[in-house]
Every structure is written in C-alpha cells, then in structure tokens.
Image (cartoon, rainbow, N blue to C red):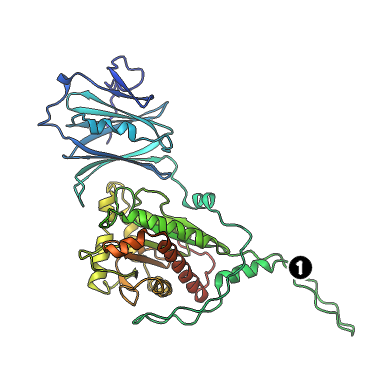
Amino acid sequence: MPRTPALPPDSLIPGSPKRRTALKAGGTLLLSVVAPALLPSSASAAQIMAVRVWPADEYTRVTLENDGDLKASHFMVPDPPRLVVDIEGLALNETLKSLVAKVESNDPYIKQVRVGQNRPNVVRLVFDLKEEVKPQVFNLAPVAGYRHRLIFDLYPTRPVDSLAAMIAKENWSATPAPAAPATPAPPVQPGEPTVGQAGPDAIAKLEADAARAGPTPAAPQPTTPQPPAASKPAPGPKVARMVTIALDPGHGGEDPGATGATGTHEKDIVLEIAKRLKAKLEALPNTRVMLTRDADFFVPLGKRVEKARNVQADLFVSIHADAFVQPTARGSSVFVLSEKGASSTAARWLADDQNKADLIGGVNLGSHDKQLASVLFDLSTTAQINDSMKLGKAVLSEIGGINRLHKGAVEQAGFAVLKAPDIPSILVETAFISNPEEEAKLKDSGYKDQLADAITKGIKRYFAYNPPLAKSRMT
C-alpha cells in the first residue's frame, strides 16, 4: 500500500518552506540538489544505469534501470495533480538527473519531472501531471540484457476505449472504391495445402450491396389486366457490413524484439510494415483497421488480444521478424494457435521466445489479469483454429510469391497472442532479421511494401471463401 505522510518533508513540493537550492533545467524544469555531505555513500547506495520514458495515448511508462533492487513508495497530491515517489537506497547521479530532459512536451500525461535528494539515502521524484492518473509502481527482475528495473506506469483515470480510438483515427471513406479486377492466384508452394481457385471477392460484394441502395426499378406493366397486388413498403438502402481487422505489430517500448547484425530492431520494422498494411487494407471498401500499438510503446500480450476483442475484430494479424541462433536461418512463416503442442521443434522454440514478451516488456504481476488469460486459453476453440488455418494458408501462399518460405505449410504452436477465442488469428514472421540478407530486405522500403501487398491479397482471398458474418461476439 502506498504510504501518505501527513506532512511530506519534501522541498520539491511547491509551497514547501524547506525548499533547497534548485537548478533550472530546460528553462522550466527544476532539479533540487543538496550539499555533498548529505549524500549517501556510493558503496551502500544503488546506482541508476539508464532512464527511459515511453509516452503513448494509452499510458506513459518511465523506467529506471539500476544495479540493485530498489524500494519505492508513492502518493498522489491533488490540485494541481502530482505523483510523488520516494526511492530508498539510491544515490543521486547524473544519469538520474537526465530524466528531467527525457520528458517531451507532447507527453499526454507528464508535464515535467523534478528529481532531488530528499534526505540521506532517499531520492524523491515529483511528476507534475497534465491530468489525474492511476499510477502503477513496480520492480522487474533482470532479464534479457536488462538489469533491475523500477517502473512507473501512468494510466488515465478513464481507460482509452479501443473502438472509439480506432474510429477517431481511421481515414476510411464512406464512399467505396471500385473493386479491383480478380487476379489469378499464385502457384501453391510445395507441401502447402491447397486453398482453391479464387472465388467472389467478399469485400467487393459488400461494396456492390451498398451501391444497389434504393428500390428496385419497376418491371414493364403487363397488357392484360391483373388483380391489384398487396401494397409493400419500399425497400430501404442496404447498409454495408464493415470489416474490422486488428493488426498487431509485435514488441515495442522496453521490448525491442530481435535485433539484426546492423542494429535493426524488430519492433521498428514490424511497426512500419503494419502501418503500410493498414493503409492498403483501409483502401478496400468497407474495411477499417485497428493497430494494437501505433507508436513505440509496450503492450502486454493479453492486452493485445483484449483490444482486438473490444473492437469486435473479424481478423487478428500479428506481425513479427524471426530470429534464430544461427544466422543462416531464413524464410517467411505463418503460424496459428495449437491446442495439442507445436507442429515442430522450431515452432515450439519460437512460441516460447515470443511468449517471453511480457517478461521483457514488463508487466505488473500485481495487476495482471491472470483469470482473463486462463479464460482466453480455455475458450480457444477448434472452430477458431480451423478458420485461422484457412487465413494462414491464404496469406502464406501470397507471401510465397515474394520471399522464400521457411516451411511450405502453416505451422502451429502455443502463441499467447493468438488466443482470442472468437477471432481467426495468425502470426506472420516476415523474414529472419538475424539473417544479414533478410535484414537488408526488411530495411528496404520496396520489400516492406511488397509484404503489405501480399498480406492484403491473402486477407482478400480468405474473405472470398469466408465472408464475415453478423457481429455476435462474446464479451
């Protein structure tokens, strides 16, 4: 429980009579400092190794990476809203002082931050806020190259509504674009189950239904008298069924994903591919797209699934860039969920690696909804997996036209991010970022555009045989 002292002995709280000497940072940020005699001994105090700030509409995260397990307490101060954090066993150093310059003016929740040695062996942070927040303060153990991390997650008091946010950001037009002419399907890769010849484009059919709005033209009148027909109300315009697709750029924020030989981060590559794919999908009639993240911040695996379900997505496509211990591994892959174990050792290894995202990105286990994760796992049905296989085959067939396939068939494994019980879900490994040649491809704008085109065509092929049904989702 956060402790709330009646009279916080802090020179950093505005109006305090005990304000110490302050340094002005950036013209507006104040940094309190004290005489060296009051500072704790470096031998007994932890040191801050790095500070990072990850602003996003959903929440802002502040990370203090350090060489020890820090003990922190916090409390809120209203009017104006501030978050005050006291960290014990910590020495004030230049790295920690640099936090004040990490907060940018466009941060949705933090106005500025002030850092000071509150008393011997205790450092105080004061976050001046733009609005009231619900803070989560927690520690993360060392993992994947990170040392100990102290995390501050600042959430809005009213959580961001995924559906409202998608509608507010979308740029699709109510006027459908002309349907593209059907193109022959590319040859099926060896070992891949056949998809069949292309059928009618379901998305184009939705467009045609909308275009046929209004009453049907009257037929020619017969020459012989006929009995009067019963009057019928004139048919109204047909409403087009919107198709909603959730795109999930993997990793983000504290979790960079795999890193190529030249320093390329998976999280950056897949976000760019997802944005290109979003634009191409929204160019289709009656189609809108939700990104689980649209900037560089971390989203827990369960939250990605939850966001897709909140917008009642018809499809869920998670985008990644493979990595393996040997740089010779190459090729694109598509995965779906498995209830009975992985389809190969490599698939199991990859799923285990991807499922570590919550450990690397950092999830507050005290607030993590383990019950939701269990329910999603239990509700993952055979029907969902079957539909996911159909989608996966269609997408894999299209990707095979632009890049070598790692395997000629859709693979299965226990990916946590694919466990939406009522949404066909696939995970696309676009290429091996650990392979120098494929890393160069992933950095090429033309190749990223080809990938987005291929996935778009695969989704259209899927809808040709599996038209979206009426919304009747579980909540």
Residue in the image at 19% along x and 47% along y: 142
The image shows residue 133 at horizontal and vertical percentages of 39, 37
The image shows residue 233 at horizontal and vertical percentages of 76, 68
Quadrant for the N terminus, please.
top left
Q: Of helix, strand and loop, which one carries label 1?
A: loop
Q: Nearer the viewer, residue 314 or 50?
A: 50
Q: Is residue 416 visible?
A: no
Residue in the image at 41% along x and 75% along y: 397
The image shows residue 404 at horizontal and vertical percentages of 34, 73
Residue type at tag 1: Pro
Residue carrying label 1: 233
Q: Quadrant of residue 36?
A: top left
The image shows residue 4 at horizontal and vertical percentages of 29, 28
Q: Quadrant of residue 156?
A: top left
Residue in the image at 26% along x and 28% along y: 124
Give the residue furthest to the top. 17
Q: Nearer the viewer, residue 323 or 156?
A: 323
Within-10-Å neighbours for mark 1: few <14, some 14–19, many 20+ = few
